[in-house]
Image (spheres, rainbow, N blue to C red):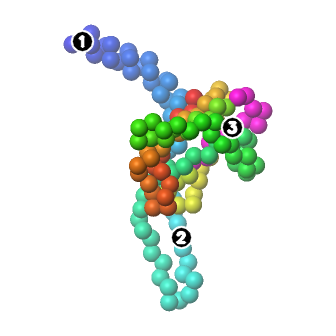
């Protein structure tokens, strides 16, 4: 039993750096957003749905998102109930940026990907949709 425990600890330590390196380039599952609405006239009341945010889309940019150079996935393939989009990212002087879009808000977050990243895979669940019609993102992995 002690040997098995040591093997499991060793295995966990061996894969942990890889997992953490990949997680740095993935979209957080949710983000915290504070919204504030204003009624268009006194007879209107503003209320809030309370729906949670959830990652609902991914955009890869060549350069900062403000430059609006979004890239189309190099391939898209069905795999069971999933759709997998793949971006191949050759070296770029401008760098690549990952932008994460969320359901139930207009808020987006983005960050520059490490220069070592050469590919991003996004897995969507083709059978689950948000109210706006978008497929649910199951995973984002840039490596």
Callout 3 secondary element: strand
Residue 97: within the magenta? yes
SS assignment at label 1: helix
The residue lying toward the viewer, choosing from 123 and 51, is 123
For the record, the magenta segment spans 90-100
Q: Residues within 10 Å of mark 2 (few under 14, many from 20)?
A: few
Spatial CA distance of label 1 from label 2 is 56 Å
User: Residue 96: which numbered mark, if any?
Assistant: 3
- Give the percent coordinates (x, y) of residue 85: 56, 39
Q: Can you give x and y, in whole percent of width and height, for residue 59 in the image?
A: 62, 46
- What residue sits right under mark 2 in the picture? 36
Q: Quadrant of the C terminus?
A: top right
Q: Is residue 139 visible?
A: no
Horizontal side, residue 104 vs residue 11: left or right: right
Q: Which numbered circle lies on residue 2?
A: 1
- In terms of sequence position, does the residue under pointer 2 or pointer 3 come before the other? 2
Q: Earlier in the sequence, mark 1 or mark 2?
A: 1
Query: Magenta stretch containing residue 132, yes or no?
Result: no
Tell me which residue sits at (21%, 13%) in the image: 1
Where, by quadrant of the figure, is residue 92 drawn?
A: top right
At x 64% / y 28%, what residue is drawn? 118
């Amino acid at each position: 039993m002690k040997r098995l425990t040591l093997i499991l600890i060793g295995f966990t330590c061996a894969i942990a750096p890889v997992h953490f390196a990949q997680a740095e380039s993935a979209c957080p599952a949710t983000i915290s957003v504070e919204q504030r609405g204003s009624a268009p006239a006194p007879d209107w009341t503003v209320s809030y749905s309370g729906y949670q945010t959830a990652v609902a889309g991914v955009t890869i940019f060549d350069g900062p998102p403000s430059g609006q150079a979004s890239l189309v996935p190099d391939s898209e393939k069905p795999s069971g109930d999933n759709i997998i989009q793949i971006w191949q990212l050759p070296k770029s002087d401008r760098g690549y940026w990952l932008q994460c879009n969320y359901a139930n808000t207009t808020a987006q977050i983005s960050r520059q990907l490490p220069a070592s990243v050469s590919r991003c895979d996004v897995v969507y669940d083709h059978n689950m949709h948000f109210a706006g019609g978008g497929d649910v993102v199951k995973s984002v992995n840039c490596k």
